[in-house]
Amino acid sequence: MSLESTRPLLLRLNFPFCAHRCAYCPQQSQPHTEVALRAYGQAMLVEMAAAAEEGEGRTVTAVSLEGGCPGLMSADSLQDILRGLRKHFPLADDVQISVQTMPGEYSQAFMRKLRDNGVSFWTVGLQTAVLEEHLLLDRPYKFDALTMVDAALKNFDPRLLNFELLYGIPGQTSLSLGRSLEKVLAYEPDHITLAPLRLLHGTRLYDRCRAGAVKPMEPQMAANLYEEAAERLESLGYRRYTASGFARPGGQDRFRLGLLQGEDLLGLGYEAKSCLDGLCYSTGHNFNEYLAHSGELEIVADQVAQLSGEDQALRLALGRLERLEAVEGSALGERLSPLLKSGELEDTGEGYRLTPLGIASGALYRIG
């Protein structure tokens, strides 16, 4: 069977390790000792070989190494995993392989090994370049760590470079968000991800806001910051192709775009999520069980659910909204009325679209 005749498949490789949990992050991380990281890399290779059957008849068009912090793994381990992908899955000739990293995780050796094994889309999770905001979010790297990126980027072409920034941070202003934009624009990135800060239950920042120690930003103010930043990026040649994604020509995040278009997803690694032909599940009841049984899919598959036709239609509708397209009211059903009243959706005459307020307030997360 030729690759051209197969269906597209996205691969998500999850690395559930963090050097430090940020104040706004609800995720739990696993111990990242050298022994645990090495064992995890081996378990993922075993799972990869077992899961290859799930990719039969499909062509992998995009791969995302995310978490967590994939950069806590050794470059050699990530190199072995990337080689395993090519061994077990049919990859498209132009497959886009992306990796999430923190400032300070870039070294020349790290970049070289990943780049030489196909990584072509590099995300730097900066979030802010303003010290006060950095401290409030309790980011897990030294504030000046962004300068550590310079030598690696100058010596090894990263191909496509993406910076992640947050807006809606308590105390953030148009001026401070502008300073963060100036910092990342100096690198002339191909892509910028501009995401709203979400105050989630169970995080330290949520608790501080609830206790009155920190004042959260009003959604409309966050929407104003978003629109101002978006207009600036568009004036510089970046195209807004999703609610949070701004790309120069050829710089789109194809993994993210594929998800929003409803392409099938296969997740590898502990707590990775998959959705194949409407069957959705995550991997691993607990971390040690995953390490021991990663090659036994019937054991490690968790939270298995078959999406109904209505659920799948909603998933596609949310993807269209995230891609800034209009959707019919019937696709959202009873979820539509409150969002119209709040101003988070608007009726354009051709369908319903997200407004800047809907983007900044995280309306899609509530719908889904």
Image: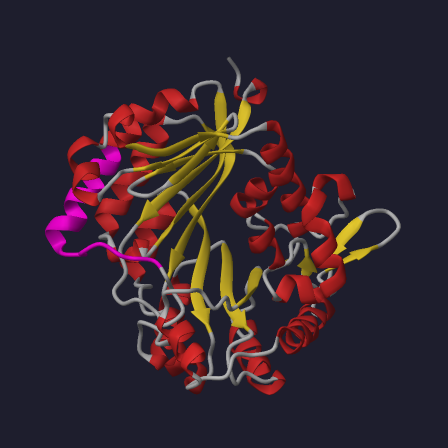
Residue 171 horizontal/vertical position (percent): 52, 85
Q: Is residue 290 left or right of residue 172?
A: left
Work out whether residue 36 or residue 364 is closer to the camera in this orientation and state it.
Answer: 364
Residue 270 horizontal/vertical position (percent): 28, 42
Q: Quadrant of residue 47?
A: top left
Work out whether residue 280 or residue 179 is closer to the camera in this orientation and state it.
Answer: 280
Q: Residue at x 33, y 26 (%)?
A: 51
235 w.r.t. 12: above or below: below
Number of residue marks: 0
286 w.r.t. 55: above or below: below
Q: Residue at x 49, y 54 (%)?
A: 159
Residue 350 horizontal/vertical position (percent): 86, 47
The stretch drawn in magenta includes residue 268: no
User: Taking the image as drawn, is residue 89 in sight?
Assistant: yes
Work out whether residue 195 or residue 189 is closer to the camera in this orientation and state it.
Answer: 195
112 w.r.t. 185: above or below: above
Q: Which color scheme is applied?
A: secondary structure
Segment colored magenta: 27-45
Q: Residue furthest left?
A: 35
Q: Is residue 264 left or right of residue 135?
A: right
Residue 324 horizontal/vertical position (percent): 71, 52
Q: Quadrant of residue 102?
A: bottom left
Q: Quadrant of residue 232?
A: bottom right
Magenta segment main secondary structure: helix
User: Taking the image as drawn, is residue 251 in sight?
Assistant: no
Q: Is residue 312 left or right of residue 18?
A: right
The stretch drawn in magenta includes residue 38: yes
Q: Residue furthest right?
A: 349
Q: Residue at x 59, y 81 (%)?
A: 178
